[in-house]
């Protein structure tokens, strides 16, 4: 998978400094831009694209814990022959946000104006998942590339390449009002430029941000860091040394109770790919992580019941074909047998 497991990695092709990347992106093809949400995802998937089925998956994801069932793809209408990536499930398990692009082989600059590459949302119904809808976080005529959504209450944090950034890709935040997202704004130079915040997760109380970054002082290529809010200001980030390694740790997810930290790391069960890891918090800090899901699995996000949603990338002959959202269900505890008096 190399460094394309998440949208931020895809964004690396937009490596020109700050506003230069955004202004060049706006110049390229702005006249042919398709308004987001005006066309369907399926209409943009190449005609030659073939949906990879589990039976044809050479590197099917595997669970290495007795706590979860073996994973399965969410299927239609969420997954397509395009690439579904960067999932985020709300704690109640009822709303799924994700990133989509119809063809992962297309350079990011050519995804800007296709009308479908970006953040989508699907809601759980009695019959399964609803047809996904585009989440529009841009003004008419504006050229942007958004992804890696994280939602806490009525706030959505997301990474984006657009005008107004302090670097090529910044974190922004939007607000939900009357069911629609708006009032999007940059989270500020302190988080973006000084702390170099990447994909993030805000704690349930809003006072900590766990994030991935290759900022100086880390243990490896990309580490998990945490910054705490005190006196209304975000404090100097702290490296989670027991979690990080000389390799790469990315896409952190913190459970609501703050007791478990999940992230993407370099697989030990399937060297050369990435896997889903979990670290548990104790009275002395974070425990060394354990790999829960292997074989091109990443970007974990959990609901309150402990079900794991993650992205799985399909590879063949060293080439990434597409990506789907997968689910590993938490096993139900065995029913307790009553030891009371019998008739």
Image (cartoon, grey):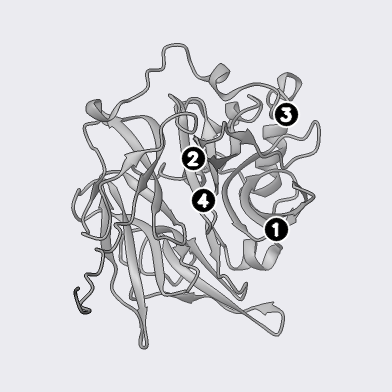
Q: Residue furthest top?
A: 47
Q: Which residue is mark 3?
A: 27
Q: Which residue is mark 2?
A: 10
Q: Which residue is mark 4?
A: 88
Figure check: 74 above or below 302 = above
Figure check: 300 above or below 7 = below
Q: Residues within 10 Å of mark 4 (few under 14, many from 20)?
A: many
- Residue 265, image x and y in percent? 33, 57
What whole-number distance in Å separates the C-alpha atoms at marks 1 and 4?
14 Å
Judging depth in this view, the residue of 180 and 244 nearest the camera is 180
Which structural element holds mark 2?
helix
On the image, which quarter does residue 200 sit in? bottom right
Camera-near label (2 vs 3) is 2
Camera-near label (3 vs 1) is 1
Which structural element holds mark 4?
strand
Residue 317 visible somewhere in the drawing = no
In primary-sequence order, the first of circles 2 and 1 is: 2
Q: Residues within 10 Å of mark 1 (few under 14, many from 20)?
A: few
Which structural element holds mark 1?
loop
């Amino acid at each position: 998978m190399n460094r394309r497991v998440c949208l931020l990695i895809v964004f690396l092709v937009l490596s020109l400094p700050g506003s230069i990347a955004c202004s060049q992106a706006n110049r390229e093809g702005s006249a042919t831009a398709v308004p987001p949400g005006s066309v369907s995802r399926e209409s943009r998937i190449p005609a030659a694209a073939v949906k990879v089925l589990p039976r044809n998956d050479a590197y099917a994801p595997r669970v290495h814990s007795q706590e979860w069932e073996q994973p399965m793809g969410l299927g239609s209408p969420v997954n397509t022959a395009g690439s579904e990536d960067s999932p985020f499930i709300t704690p109640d398990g009822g709303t799924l946000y994700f990133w989509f692009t119809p063809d992962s082989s297309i350079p990011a600059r050519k995804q800007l104006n296709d009308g479908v590459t970006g953040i989508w949302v699907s809601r759980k119904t009695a019959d399964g998942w609803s047809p996904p809808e585009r989440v529009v976080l841009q003004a008419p005529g504006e050229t942007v590339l958004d992804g890696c959504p994280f939602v806490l209450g009525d706030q959505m944090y997301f990474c984006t390449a657009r005008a107004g950034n302090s670097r090529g890709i910044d974190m922004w935040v939007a607000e939900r009002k009357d069911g629609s997202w708006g009032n999007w704004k940059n989270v500020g130079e302190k988080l973006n430029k000084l702390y170099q915040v990447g994909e993030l997760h805000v704690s349930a109380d809003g006072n900590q941000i766990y994030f991935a970054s290759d900022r100086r002082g880390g243990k490896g290529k990309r580490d998990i860091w945490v910054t705490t809010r005190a006196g209304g200001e975000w404090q100097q980030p702290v490296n989670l040394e027991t979690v990080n390694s000389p390799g790469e740790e990315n896409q952190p997810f913190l459970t609501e109770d703050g007791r478990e930290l999940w992230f993407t790391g370099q697989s030990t069960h399937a060297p050369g790919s990435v896997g889903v890891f979990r670290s548990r918090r104790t009275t002395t800090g974070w425990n060394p992580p354990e790999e829960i899901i292997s074989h091109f699995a990443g970007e974990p996000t959990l609901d309150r019941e402990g079900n794991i949603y993650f992205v799985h990338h399909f590879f063949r002959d060293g080439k990434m074909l597409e990506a789907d959202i997968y689910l590993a269900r938490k096993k139900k505890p065995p029913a307790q047998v009553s030891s009371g008096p019998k008739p």
